[in-house]
Amino acid sequence: MYLIETEDNIGFLTASYIKNRIKSFVSTKDNPYFVLALPTGGTAINLYGHLVKFYKEGLSFDKVVTFNLDEYVGLSENHPQSYHSFMFKNLFNHIKISKEQINILNGNAANLEQECTNYEEKMKKYGGIDLFIGGIGRNGHIAFNEPGSAFNSKTRVVDLTPNTISANARFFNDDISQVPTRALTMGLGTIMSAKEVIIMATGAKKSQALYHAFEDKQSTSWPVTVLQKHPRTFIIADKAAAAEISKTTKRDCGLCSFIN
Ligand code: PGA
């Protein structure tokens, strides 16, 4: 797991990395699509703005399939706060990409467990995730893998913690009672099987989670620590988010190359 502490725009850096990976991807008969796992959340809005700009400058998504990390249970797809709405509003409505290339978990499926199993199978059918992009919660969650999530967990139905529900109330008129209490999410095991992982972290609210990510031993109390054993994970953080990481760790991570 590598730390990239930067003053640069994290959305721009991440979008640039995605662009480079898509452009260097060689589509073959056996492996036609680059598989990109995509997040929602405040940090992602900036990222998608830059991806749309790259699209307008000529970046093609023709050989890309996307899998979103998670979705609320029981919120209609058309609800402004559903992750379906978020993705179309911020990305898919602005680029050329077919419905068949877009995968978002259906939080209203009649059989939620089956929906999760099908999602895992579909990712496998495409050869697994090439590049996973995520944010991080204040409590160290990745996607909706809350503290206590098993490190080998797969896509599944989860209960959201009070911490996450209250963090997300800002998207529901600050009314906690409107925030769904369950979600479907890729698991930590799903994320670990991705070939590359980028986690974006901005602001002081994320500093405790990053402290545990880099300075603590692995523990399900801080889901992000699962990534300590992932061979190609980059955590891109601004100064505020990286504030609690020790100088020694920063020095060790300082030489890692990012865009290569
Ligand atoms: P945020 O969410 O980008 O809105 O801070 C990240 C997350 O909770 O995964």
Image (cartoon, rainbow, N blue to C red):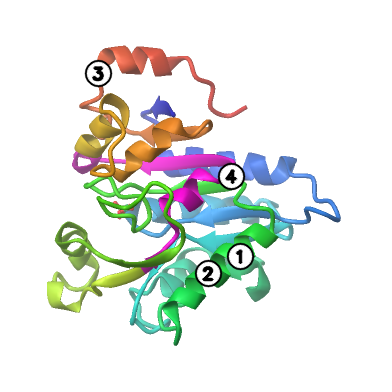
Which amino acid lies under the numbered mark 2 shown in the image of this protein? Thr
Q: Is mark 4 within 8 Å of ligand 1?
A: no
| Residue 39 among those drawn in magenta | no
Q: Give the x, y percent position of residue 147.
A: 25, 50
- Work out whether residue 212 or residue 226 is closer to the camera in this orientation and state it: 226
Estimate how packed mark 3 is, as few (under 14), some (14 to 19) or many (20 or more) residues with alpha carbons within 10 Å. Answer: few
Q: Are marks 2 and 1 in contact (CB under 8 Å)?
A: yes
Label located before the other in sequence (4 or 2): 4
From the image, tell me which residue sits under label 4.
18
Secondary structure under tag 3 reads loop
Circles 1 and 3 in contact, beta carbons < 8 Å: no
| Mark 4: secondary structure | helix
Q: CA distance from mark 1 to mark 3?
A: 40 Å
CB-based contact (under 8 Å), mark 1 and mark 4: no
Q: Quadrant of residue 125?
A: bottom right
Disc 2 from disc 1: Cα separation: 6 Å
**Of discs 1 and 4, which sits in the foreground?**
1
**Can residue 26 be seen from the camera position used here?**
yes
Span shown in magenta? 184-206
**Residue 60, labelled with which disc?**
none
- Numbered tag placed on residue 121 in the rendering: 1
Which residue occupies 69% across, 59% down?
A: 126
Closer to us: 227 or 167: 227
Query: Dot 2 lies on which element?
Result: helix
Three-letter residue code for mark 1: Glu
Question: In terms of image quadrants, where is residue 207?
Answer: top left
Quadrant of the image for the C terminus? top right
CB atoms of marks 4 and 2 within 8 Å = no
Q: Residue at x 25, y 28 (%)?
A: 216
Q: Which mark is residue 117?
A: 2
Q: Choose mark 3 or mark 2, whichever is in front.
A: 2
